[in-house]
Amino acid sequence: MEHYAPDIIYIDEAAAPYPKTAEIVARLPGLPVARVKDKAEALAALQSSASRIDAGKQVLFLTTQRGRFFKKCPGTKGQICCNYYVVNFATNCHLDCSYCILQGYYENNPFITFFVNTDDLLAELDAVFSEDPTRLFRVGTGEFTDSLAMDDITEFSKIVVPFFANRSNATLELKTKSDMIANLLALDHRGRVSVAWSVNAPRRIASEEPKTATLDERLRAAARCQDAGYQIGFHFDPIFYYPGWETEYHGVIEQMFAVVRPENVSWISLGGFRYAPELKPIIRRRFPDSQILCGEFVTCADGKMRYLKPIRLEIYRSMLAKIHRYGRHIPVYLCMDSPQVWRQVYGWTPNCDRDLSHLFDPRLTI
Ligand code: SF4
């Protein structure tokens, strides 16, 4: 995988006094560092760039989170959501997958941003989890960035894993397409943390995710995390549909279970490729050779474009059947698809968060 190598670090006024800021600067010796008053001043420096998205990824912006770090996963209208909470510890990602939805979010906030006030983050989580000790929180950090791709620079895992290790009513998922696991191996996670890899067919990784770790590298990292006692998750997201898709994706499942034991799998999600219409011109402009927009798509209730329903059903049924050959009890869920599709794949529809918690509870009990 490509390690993050920014051209410059911007530090805003609020971030300057934090120890994390000095730590990160020290880990990137020789890099120019610019003090800025605020994000507006940093953005002004990008004004002459032909592509704000590309130029923004070359800037590591250290700032503080002034809003909330912790949110319920926004989900998407009309689709089943998996009762998940997200910790917004950083935004944007240098791995630059062609389909990444963050390209659409961050056209106006294009920096790779890390929030250095990590003590405030832990205090906020502590308050939320303590307020309702009987409730189980499934929490992830990979919604607005990759959970681990910059862990060599931020060492955020060393902060967040020990925190979750000591919580009885919360579990953490670190979701990644990297193999940046060195920090994790020595941490005492006490079974409260899953490390999850988004996986794809090797040809799709090469064409659409070329800066990420290869499938082999991801699976080697998964095997090492398994040996370190972590539960392992896998996300087939996005699954692309093309001639020969089934053979290639089934091959990925075979490779996965050659290295990870079914009993160590926390969950697997399935999500067909989908995109917001606003993303289409961005993908066309930035990745003119990408084939992912070819094919027939339908507009769904949330405004996103998805493969036609029979195709999604074919994908999910085929993948589910293949995964279940390795164990009927491996939790498999559909990522952001409609109640109708859930019913046709599973024979039932989750009505509420509690239904989905049942899917996960056997693995992650309070
Ligand atoms: S790894 Fe995830 S967050 Fe990073 S560019 Fe790819 S899709 Fe976006």
Image: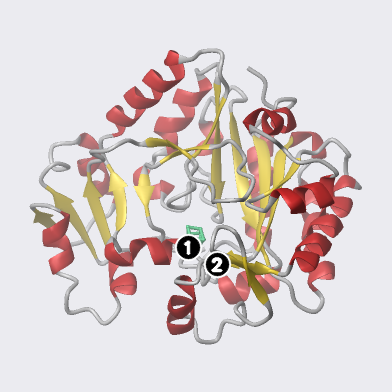
Question: Which disc, if any, is residue 275?
Answer: 2
Question: From the viewer's perspective, is the residue at label 2 or at label 1 nearer?
Answer: 2
Query: In the image, is residue 362 above or below residue 296?
Result: above
Q: Is disc 2 in contact with disc 1, using a CB cutoff of under 8 Å?
A: yes
Q: Residue at x 48, y 15 (%)?
A: 132
Q: Amino acid at mark 2?
A: Tyr
Mark 1 sits near ligand 1, with its Cβ under 8 Å away: yes
| Count of all numbered marks drawn on residues in the image | 2
Label ID, residue 101: 1
For the residue pair 105 and 30, the one nearer the viewer reads as 105
Q: Residue 200's image quarter?
A: bottom right
- How far, Cα to Cα, is label 2 from label 1? 7 Å
In the image, 109 versus 344, the foreground residue is 344
Rendered location of residue 339, percent (x, y): 71, 48
Residue 57: image quadrant is bottom left
- Residue 217 in the image: state x and y as whole percent: 63, 58
Q: Report x, y in % for residue 96.
A: 46, 67
Query: Could you say which is closer to the camera, residue 29 or residue 261?
Result: 261
Which residue is at 54% across, 63% downward?
Answer: 303
- Residue 294: which quarter of the image? bottom right
In this picture, residue 286 sits left or right of residue 82: left
Q: Residue, x 68% and y 78% (percent of image)?
A: 296
